[in-house]
């Protein structure tokens, strides 16, 4: 689904990502792990076209999108659910969802798609008229994922969807990711919650100071004591 090679990107003169290579296979959950400031969000921004690649190539289903505008990437099926949710707080739930159907592919089927989102997240149907900014953090995250689904994605980029959520909501978000995979979506998930993220991952990459330090199946990474301690911050008891 996604093949990235030699990607470097950053902000102005600052280079954050150095020669990043990764692959996301269709129908899988691929996880991007890394501590604060490792460059996870920067990579998500570069993939979705919010910042430009300084070098390297991004292929989506074999098509070179390295220089494509953000909206063209959305049209091609690559949709970002950004860190911090970034919903529109003074608009109601349904209005936020409608704004997710911006691509031409998605617009024609917006009503059908809203129904699909409501079936997946019944809480959003209950709260369809509520101002989004008055919802709980977990509900706002569901809304952000729902808005992403309105874009009719093939590849969904989820940037730290569990950040700041209560444990019960973290569990719910991971269940949702599992359900989305079962329904055929392909997901690239950036997470600091290394244990859960590695458990759910078909394949995982560890980003360290802007480069890929390590990669492997979730099982392989969790199986190595050195990896657990140095890169995942997990002690032997976990
Ligand atoms: P976190 O989990 O804390 O969000 P992250 O792995 O997502 O961390 P990034 O947000 O990608 O990390 O940040 C990587 C580096 O890029 C950091 O050194 C950060 O200060 C820098 N950075 C991020 N955004 C900008 C920006 N808009 N302008 C300049 N530097 C930035």
Image (cartoon, grey):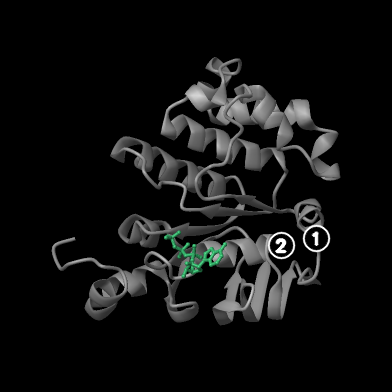
Q: Residue at x 76, y 57 (%)?
A: 70
Where is mark 1, residue-wise? 69
The residue beneath circle 2 is 49
Labelled pair 1, 2 in contact (Cβ < 8 Å): yes
The part of the image, by quadrant, that contains residue 105 is top right
- Residue shown at 26% from the left, 72% from the top: 228
Q: Nearer the viewer, residue 55 or 142?
A: 55
Q: Please determine whether, in this image, residue 7 is positioned above or below residue 200.
A: below
Q: Position of residue 122 (x, y in %)?
A: 53, 23
Q: Is residue 192 left or right of residue 157?
A: left
Task: Find numbered disc 2 in the image and state the secondary structure of the residue it sits on.
Answer: loop
Q: Is mark 2 within 8 Å of ligand 1?
A: no
* Point 50% across, 33% down: residue: 140
Residue at figure coordinates x 68%, y 60% from the top left = 48
Indicate the position of residue 120 as horizontal and vertical percent values: 56, 31
Please give the label number shown on residue 147: none
Where in the figure is residue 177, as x and y percent of width and height? 49, 47
Cα separation, mark 1 vs mark 2, equals 6 Å
């Amino acid at each position: 689904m996604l093949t990235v090679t030699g990607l470097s990107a950053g902000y102005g003169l600052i280079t954050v990502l150095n020669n990043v290579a990764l692959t996301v296979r269709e129908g899988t959950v691929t996880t991007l792990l890394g501590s604060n400031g490792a460059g996870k969000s920067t990579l998500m921004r570069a993939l979705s076209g919010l910042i430009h690649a300084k070098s390297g190539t991004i292929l989506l289903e074999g098509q070179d999108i390295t220089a494509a505008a953000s909206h063209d990437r959305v049209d091609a099926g690559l949709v970002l659910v950004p860190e911090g949710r970034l919903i529109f707080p003074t608009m109601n739930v349904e209005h936020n969802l409608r704004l997710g159907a911006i691509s031409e592919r998605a617009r024609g089927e917006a009503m059908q798609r809203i129904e699909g989102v409501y079936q997946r997240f019944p809480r959003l149907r209950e709260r369809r008229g509520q101002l989004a900014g008055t919802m709980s953090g977990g509900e706002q995250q569901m809304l952000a994922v729902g808005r992403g689904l309105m874009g009719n994605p093939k590849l969904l980029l989820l940037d730290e969807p569990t950040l700041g959520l209560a444990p019960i909501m973290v569990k719910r978000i991971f269940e949702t990711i599992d359900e989305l995979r079962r329904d055929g979506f392909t997901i690239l998930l950036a997470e600091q919650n290394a244990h859960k993220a590695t458990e759910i991952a078909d394949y995982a990459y560890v980003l360290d100071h802007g480069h890929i330090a390590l990669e492997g199946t979730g099982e392989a990474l969790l199986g190595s004591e050195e990896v657990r301690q140095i890169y995942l911050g997990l002690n032997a008891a976990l």
